[in-house]
Image (cartoon, helix red, strand yellow):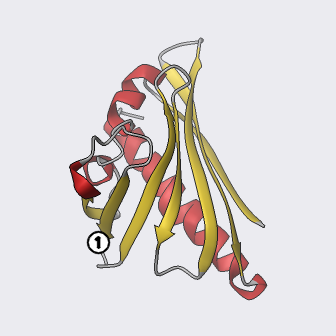
């Protein structure tokens, strides 16, 4: 099982950052690699079980299913259903934790998946840097830090 873990500190309260990332269909509004997204079957974007179908800027299509979402604990967990990446059993969690010293929050994004051992290093690096850190960098720019 391959694992990816990325964390950062964002210069805004966890509640403010959560408002921006909470909507499972809002990736194009905050992540620069995402071109467009829609929730299948017109389900609410915060309904556990809903599926987002989105396209990257490069045209690749990915389908992901929301497995868990908590406004109390500020996290969402999702699984990749279809992707051009050579992986399986992908489950990821994006979690925010308040930092009580100032208007900041600790953000962490992690994933586990299975893949061919020959692909693992490239996948871990690509997901960690392009997806997770790329999203965090965009959030930090948005919130001025």
Residue 10, percent from left and from top: 49, 33
User: Is 8 placed left or right of 144 in the picture?
Assistant: right
- Judge whether 12 appears above or below 43 on screen: above
Q: Residue at x 54, y 58 (%)?
A: 79
Q: Quadrant of the C terminus?
A: top left
Which class describes the residues within 10 Å of circle 1: few (<14), some (14-19), or many (20+)? few
Foreground pick, 139 / 36:
36
Which residue is rendered at x = 64% and y = 78% of the image?
Answer: 122
In terms of depth relative to the viewer, which is nearer, 90 or 140?
90
Residue 102 drawn above or below residue 60: above
Q: Residue 6 location in percent, x, y?
A: 63, 50
Residue found at x 35% / y 32% = 143
Asked which secondary structure carries label 1, the reply is loop
The residue at the point 37 percent across, 23 percent down is: 16
In this rendering, position of residue 3 left or right of residue 97: right
Q: In the rendered view, does 42 fall on the left or right side of 114?
A: left
Q: Is residue 98 visible?
A: yes
Q: Position of residue 9 (x, y in %)?
A: 56, 34
Q: In the rendered image, which residue does mark 1 sit on?
A: 57
Q: Is residue 125 above or below residue 49?
A: below
């Amino acid at each position: 099982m391959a694992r990816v873990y990325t964390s950062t500190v964002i210069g805004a309260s966890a509640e403010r950052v959560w408002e921006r990332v909470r909507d499972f269909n809002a990736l194009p509004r905050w992540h620069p690699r995402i071109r467009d997204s829609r929730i299948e079957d017109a389900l609410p974007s915060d309904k556990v079980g809903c599926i987002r179908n989105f396209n990257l800027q490069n045209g690749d299509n990915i389908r992901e299913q929301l497995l868990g979402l908590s406004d109390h604990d500020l996290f969402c967990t999702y699984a990749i259903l279809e992707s051009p990446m050579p992986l399986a059993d992908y489950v990821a969690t994006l979690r925010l934790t308040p930092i009580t010293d100032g208007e900041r929050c600790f953000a962490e994004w992690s994933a586990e998946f299975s893949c061919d051992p020959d692909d693992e290093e490239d996948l871990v690096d690509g997901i960690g840097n392009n997806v997770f850190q790329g999203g965090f960098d965009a959030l930090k720019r948005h919130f001025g830090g």
